[in-house]
Amino acid sequence: MHSQLKAIVAVAILALAPSANAVGCFSGGQTGDCSGAINDICSRVNGVAFGAGQVISSCTNFNGYRCNMAVHNTGGGGSSIGFQQCVDDMTATNNGCGAHGGIRADGNFQLTLDPNAGAC
């Protein structure tokens, strides 16, 4: 019985631990599909050696809304993120946040996808 309790506690702790690719979804505001802008921002950051704290951002207009996207290096200088890693993270946020967008942490990077009202 004691070993079963330990196993239950261990599973509960793992369930509460943050994912390496944790997503925080925005709960309100403009909704929109930003999938058409993902390749652009990811092409811009692909292989770039970011400085510490450096942010590369973009804004793309769609039908009646815009998509603000950013990749922020939260680590030290020289960090880089590949195209596919960026696409995977941005797509997961785009598809998994009810069209509100959000922020995804992946290693040294924080990736933001945010549909907003109005034009760039």
Image (cartoon, rainbow, N blue to C red):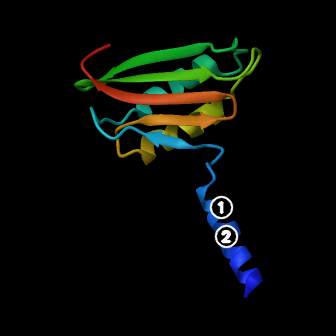
- Residue picked out by circle 1: 13
What is the secondary structure assignment of the residue under circle 2?
A: helix
x then y, percent, for residue 62: 30, 24
Left or right of residue 117, residue 24 in this image: right
Towards the viewer: 15 or 110: 15
Name above or below for residue 26 compared with residue 78.
below
110 or 41: which is nearer to us?
A: 110
Above-or-below relation of 17 to 61 = below
Q: Find residue 80 and report its horizontal and vertical position in percent.
A: 72, 22
To which residue does mark 2 refer?
A: 9
Q: Residues within 10 Å of mark 1 (few under 14, many from 20)?
A: few
Would you say 117 lies left or right of 37 here?
left
Q: Secondary structure at mark 1?
A: helix
Q: Could you tell me residue 13's position as x and y percent?
A: 65, 61
Q: Position of residue 43 (x, y in %)?
A: 59, 21
- Residue at 73% x, 88% y is 1
Amino acid beneath label 1:
Ile
Name the quadrant containing residue 35.
top left
Residue at (59, 21) in percent of width and height:
72
For mark 2, does the 10 Å Cα neighbourhood hold few (<14), some (14 to 19), or many (20 or more) residues? few
Q: Residue at x 47, y 40 (%)?
A: 24
Tag 2: amino acid: Val
Which label belongs to residue 103?
Answer: none
Quarter containing the C terminus: top left
Q: Give residue 75's quadrant in the image.
A: top right
Confirm or deny contact between disc 1 and disc 2 (CB under 8 A). Answer: yes
